[in-house]
Amino acid sequence: MNADPYAWIEKSLDTVRRADWYRSPQSIESCPGPAVKLGNRRLINFASNDYLGLAGDDRLIQAAVAATKEFGTGATGSRLLSGHRDLHRQLEQAIANLKQTEDALVFSSGYLANLGAIASIVGKRDLILSDKYNHSSLKNGAALSGATVLEYDRCPLEDLTAKLEQNRTKYRKCLIITDSVFSMDGDLCPLPQLLALAEQFNCMVLVDEAHATGVFGASGAGCAEHFGCQGLPLIQVGTLSKALGSLGGYVAGSAALIDFLRNRAATWIYTTALTPADTAAALEAVRIVQQEPERRVRLQRNIETFKYYAIIDRQLPINNSLSPIFSLPLKDAATALTAASKLKEIGIFAPAIRPPTVSVSRIRISLMATHEFAHLQQLVEALEQVLSF
Ligand SMILES: *Cc1c(COP(=O)(O)O)cnc(C)c1O
């Protein structure tokens, strides 16, 4: 026996490289914003989830610094032991107020919020219906729960109806899970229709508002507000790390649900509480989201401007989205990588997204409220240039 039990790792990495699926992080050397420093160059940034431009906002920075000075760097324990601070509760109440729900619970990340919520509310005798394009955290939460998982096609929604008709009565509880804004294509889930089906078939609905919170709805509450579904029975999950510019995740819903999660969600009970800095920054961000709707107006204007120039004026083959997320589909992973590096050469940071994250390789573009008109013009010209190669 002289075989190396770890030899498979290099072999597996070689397979990843050969498929042009190999990835590694690149270092940003400046504060987040519409332009960032990357490898000694200033690039216009279309790679960020910081939709409202809050991650570099001085008010969030000051809130994080003040909380650190007062409460230290670490929470020192889980919320049920030594980790709980009044700041956590203030943030939860602020999120519940934004979402118009009875209560909310903050987790260490959006990923952990999904794992914890899904795995604690359904189990072996239950059924999960999951949109095919759901985020990894929803899919892994479903797997962790032990429930039977069926994936459905959003278009046409008859697929979900048929799956409910055929399967619902064989299971005890049923949970429909979906992104509200899909993270790679930027399209929206048909939330009102999902809620109507849920009512018809006695199902719960969990909607992941990661890319919608702060962005959609008059007060920034997300797609539930955009679609007029606030107040309906619904489990809302989200992140503090995108438009809210901090780190962490949350679940918002009924007081009973939140009380249940505090007692049963393993990814909340057995992990250290959010740091004072992250908590205070997110609390300040929620306040800004509610008090400065002009940021959403600016983001919406950038979305419309970009769509006008890219799709109508230049006829670039970009998906037509309501959200700040756009994609330029490309032939294969190698083409996407070449396109991303050409864009970088001409001053644009927009990453190639490849399998297994998506089935069709693409350049992903995300817009921010803080992009200037000139940034958008440069983006459209660069995309046109790259496509002509
Ligand atoms: C980013 C994202 C998450 C994960 O949130 P984190 O706070 O970054 O862990 C979950 N769901 C969706 C749809 C996301 O886009």
Image (spheres, grey):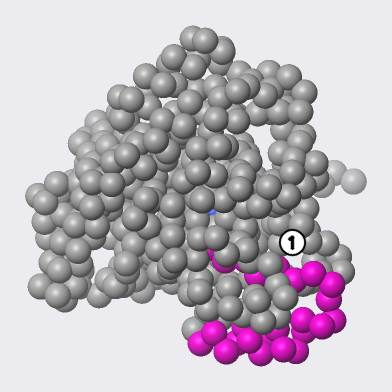
Looking at the image, residue 95 lies above or below residue 312: above
Q: Percent position (x, y) of residue 2?
A: 85, 44
Q: Residue at x 37, y 23 (%)?
A: 61
Q: Residue at x 50, y 44 (%)?
A: 97
Depth check: 209 or 338 in front? Answer: 209
Q: Percent position (x, y) of residue 30?
A: 30, 29
Question: Does the rendering let one see residue 225?
Answer: yes
Residue carrying label 1: 143
Q: Percent position (x, y) of residue 215?
A: 36, 53
How crowded pointer 1 is (Cα within 10 Å; few <14, some 14-19, many 20+) is rated as some
The answer to whether 200 appears left or right of 133 in the picture is right
Residue type marked 1: Ala
The answer to whether 40 appears left or right of 94 in the picture is left
Q: Residue at x 69, y 22 (%)?
A: 83
Magenta residue check for 306: no
Quadrant of the drawing holding the C terminus = bottom left
Q: Which residues are magenta?
A: 156-181
